[in-house]
Image (cartoon, rainbow, N blue to C red):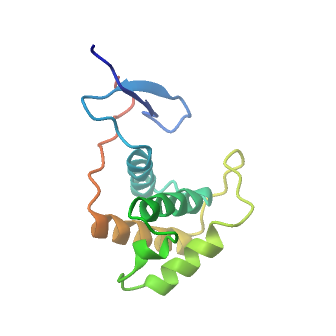
Amino acid sequence: MNIKRYFLHRPNSRGIFTLRATSDTPYFHHVATLAELRKCLEEGTLYTYHFNALRSILEKTASFFGHDDLKVCLAGLQDEALYNRALNLLSHGKYAINEPVEMVDDNKELFRRILNDVLDRFQFSLPALATEGAA
C-alpha cells in the first residue's frame, strides 16, 4: 500500500496555508515551526507571540529528551539564566495571534540570540521554506 504523507505549509506570510506532500519521512511540526521562526527572524517580522511559539518548541524538545522543564534545552548556554527568565516572562503576556504586536528592538535582539543559540546547540535540520508561488 502506498501512503502519502502531508504537512501544513505556509509559503508566504499572508496566512494562506497549503498541504505539501513529503517524501518517506514527514516533517515534524516543531521543526517546521522552528524554520518559520528563523524565517521571521531573517525578515525582521517578529511579533510578541513568537516567544510563545519558541517556548512551546523548547518544551516539546525537553519532553522528547524525557525532561519536564525547558531549562534542559538552555543548560550550558552562555546566557542560560537570562534566556530562561526572558522565555518565562515574555511568553506569558496577553499576546494574541489575531492582534499581533511587533516586538521592540531589544526583544528582537534577545529573541535572535535565544533562537540562534538553541539552533546552534541542537543542530536541527530545518527545511528551506518555499518562496511565494512554489507548490
The quarter of the rendered structure image containing the C terminus is: top left
Numbered circles on residues, count: 0
Q: Is residue 99 above or below residue 105?
A: above
Left or right: 125 with respect to 83? left
Left or right: 126 with respect to 115? left
Can residue 4 be seen here? yes
Across and down, in percent, residue 104 comes to: 60, 68
Camera-side residue: 69 or 117? 69
Q: Is residue 99 above or below residue 65?
A: above
Residue at horizontal 46%, vertical 25%?
Answer: 18
Residue at horizontal 51%, vertical 68%?
Answer: 108
Residue at the limit of the structure toward the right, as seen here: 94
Across and down, in percent, residue 10 comes to: 46, 34
Across and down, in percent, residue 61 comes to: 42, 60
Residue at the limit of the structure toward the top, as seen here: 1
Residue at horizontal 50%, vertical 39%?
Answer: 13
Camera-side residue: 135 or 5? 5
Can residue 133 be seen here? no
The quarter of the rendered structure image containing the N terminus is: top left
Camera-side residue: 95 or 123? 123
Across and down, in percent, residue 87 comes to: 56, 72
Left or right: 52 with respect to 43? right
Residue at horizontal 48%, vertical 76%?
Answer: 71
Left or right: 67 with respect to 126? right
